[in-house]
Amino acid sequence: MARVVLVDSSAASRRLVRSVLECEHDIETVEEFVDTVGLTQYLLRSMPDLVLIDSHILSKGGIEVIESIMSETPLPILLLSELDQDAQASLLLQAMSRGALAIESKPSVSDVHGGQSLRAAVRRLMRVPVVHHPRSRPLRVPNVRSVTPGTLQKREPSSRGSSSIDFANRSIEVVGIGASAGGPGVVAEILSALPKEFVACVLVVQHLPVGFADHFASFLRVRIQLPVEVPKDTLEIVPGTVIVAPDDAHLVIGARGRCQSLHSAAVRGHRPSIDLLCESMARFYGSASIGVVLSGIGSDGTAGLRAIRRSGGLTVCQDGESAAVNGMPRAASDSGAAAFRQTPREIIQTLLRARSRNRESGGLHGT
């Protein structure tokens, strides 16, 4: 039996959500809160399986309480949103950057499928182990001159082992970053450390609900120095830019120098697919690629990193201690697809070292 706590200021809404959750008798709403007062203390005592927080709570102390929960008593947190998400999108993304795992639409009386989706999300997320998040603090950006080969801290991902990959005679042209649950905050953290003169193009696949791609791009724009774009069709790959996967479409490289949105079938349940992006990077850029897999549920990104690694590119996954959800990083590491496991700070150092090497070798095309 899944034990959940519901936080929603509307009594009618709480009744509806509770009835939807409990209709198949494997989910129990063990406590309800009208606001966040006393929530963290209750969770410390009772340790339920999951917390559902209505999006309207986010503007009334909800962001801070999510940070408190993840700092003091880490639990899976699922956000409930109205169908019209535009007005709340910024708050929802902030909540995800503080540790909330996912967003689901709030069910309605007439929406049977919405109820099924919510119950499935609860069952899926309640089994996800989450990690302790220290309270937010300003990011300390490393100095590229202090980065040495020793700071890359290679860790063998599997018994197969892996040969060391360095940046000698290497020009990095594209960086692919993939993330899912727990990802928005660490994606922003890494990208915020990249300077305006960063010489590679960064392509990002972040699993999000449909309708959030443009909001995620806006979320990044106010936090990073690099320009951020979302392709509607095709887009030129330009050094020093960030390209975010569009809504409900794959982001792939279709030819050297250009990427595109692709409305083909989901790949292993994902659209956009990290695997598809990384496999296209391997095809067109090979050893001039870096693939990075961050926090997330499942194994999306493993096949893509394997393709990049086979083509001579560098592959990295987030270390399990820092990842909010260690599913995707662990899959990439255990399979040997990721040559390195690194903290976000070490990933930043790796990318800055690539930038430094590019400058020394004459820039993007100086191979």
Image (tube, rainbow, N blue to C red):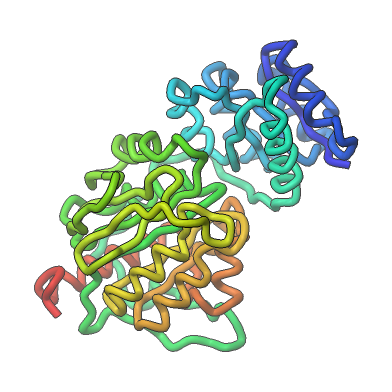
In x, y percent, where is residue 50?
74, 38
The quarter of the picture where residue 322 lies is bottom right
Question: Which residue is at 78% across, 21% downward?
Answer: 32
| Residue at image point 30% right, 35% down | 222
Number of numbered discs present? Answer: 0
- Residue 334 position within the rendered picture, expressed as x and y whole percent measured from the top left: 60, 75
Q: Residue at x 40, y 85 (%)?
A: 164
**230 on left or right of 301:** left
Q: Determine which quarter of the picture holds residue 312.
A: bottom left
Q: Residue at x 40, y 59 (%)?
A: 177
Q: Is residue 286 left or right of residue 127?
A: left
Q: Is residue 60 above or below residue 206?
A: above
Answer whether residue 75 is visible to the viewer in this image.
no
The correct choice, above or below, for 63 with respect to 130 in the image is above
Task: Please state which of residues 346 and 87 is positioned toward the viewer in this rendering.
Answer: 87
31 with respect to 166 (left or right)? right
Residue sitting nearer the eye, 35 or 21? 21
18 with respect to 252 (left or right): right
Q: Is residue 34 above or below residue 124?
A: above
Q: Position of residue 269 (x, y in %)?
A: 58, 56
Instruction: Specify the quadrant that holds the C terminus.
Output: bottom left
Residue 35 appears in the figure: yes
Residue 195 placement (x, y as % from top left): 22, 52
Quarter of the image with the N terminus in it: top right
Q: Nearer the viewer, residue 62 or 262?
A: 262
